[in-house]
Image (spheres, grey):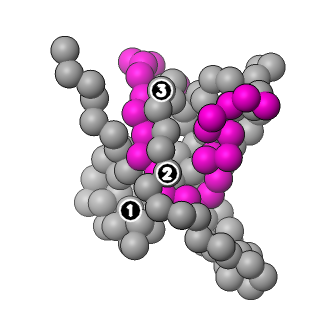
């Protein structure tokens, strides 16, 4: 059995989940906005704790058949962009607009590909 491929993704939002985990909203190139559980990511020994940040290009692997997937593997694909001041606020504002408008445009495959391409580069 072959391993599923690593998918390009970005973190949109994280929030605590149970004792040591987080719920992570990701923008995945082939799927759009997806919620996943990052088990153990809030512990001090977590290898992925610092990677679950907005604006960091990632490659992910997940498992699960329900709507809430489990994040299995996570790798940074390039250094994080150092946004400060007005650029940081502008980026956060645009990301928030994207999250809010997602319900109106979800599952439009062509839109997902175009937006992800602009977000990635």
Relative to 10, residue 21 above or below: above
Question: Residue beneath label 2, please?
Answer: 76
Front one among 32 and 121: 121
Question: Is residue 46 magenta-colored?
Answer: yes
Find residue 23 and report its horizontal and vertical position in percent.
Answer: 65, 33
- Considering the numbered disc 1 on the image, is that residue within a helix, a strand or a loop? helix
For the C terminus, give its image quadrant: bottom left
Q: Nearer the viewer, mark 2 or mark 1?
A: 2
Find residue 25 and report its horizontal and vertical position in percent.
Answer: 58, 43
- Considering the numbered disc 3 on the image, is that residue within a helix, a strand or a loop? strand
Whether residue 18 is visible: yes
Q: Earlier in the sequence, mark 2 or mark 1?
A: 2
* Residues in magenta, as a range: 44-68
Question: Is residue 59 magenta-colored?
Answer: yes
Find residue 4 and report its horizontal and vertical position in percent.
Answer: 28, 29
Label of residue 72 in the image: 3
- Considering the numbered disc 2 on the image, is that residue within a helix, a strand or a loop? strand
Front one among 5 and 67: 5
Residue in the picture at 35% in, 57% down: 112
Label of residue 116 in the image: 1
How far is disc 3 from disc 1 in space, using C-alphas? Answer: 22 Å
């Amino acid at each position: 059995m072959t391993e599923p491929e690593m998918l390009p993704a970005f973190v949109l939002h994280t929030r605590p989940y149970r004792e040591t985990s987080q719920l992570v909203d990701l923008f995945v190139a082939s799927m759009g906005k997806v919620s996943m559980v990052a088990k153990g990511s809030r512990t001090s020994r977590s290898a992925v704790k610092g990677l679950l940040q907005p604006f960091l290009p990632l490659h992910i692997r997940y498992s699960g058949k329900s709507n809430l997937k489990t994040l299995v593997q996570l790798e940074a694909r390039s250094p994080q962009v150092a946004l400060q001041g007005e650029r940081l606020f502008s980026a956060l504002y645009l990301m928030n607009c994207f999250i809010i408008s997602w319900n109106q445009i979800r599952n439009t495959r062509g839109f997902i590909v175009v937006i992800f391409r602009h977000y990635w580069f």
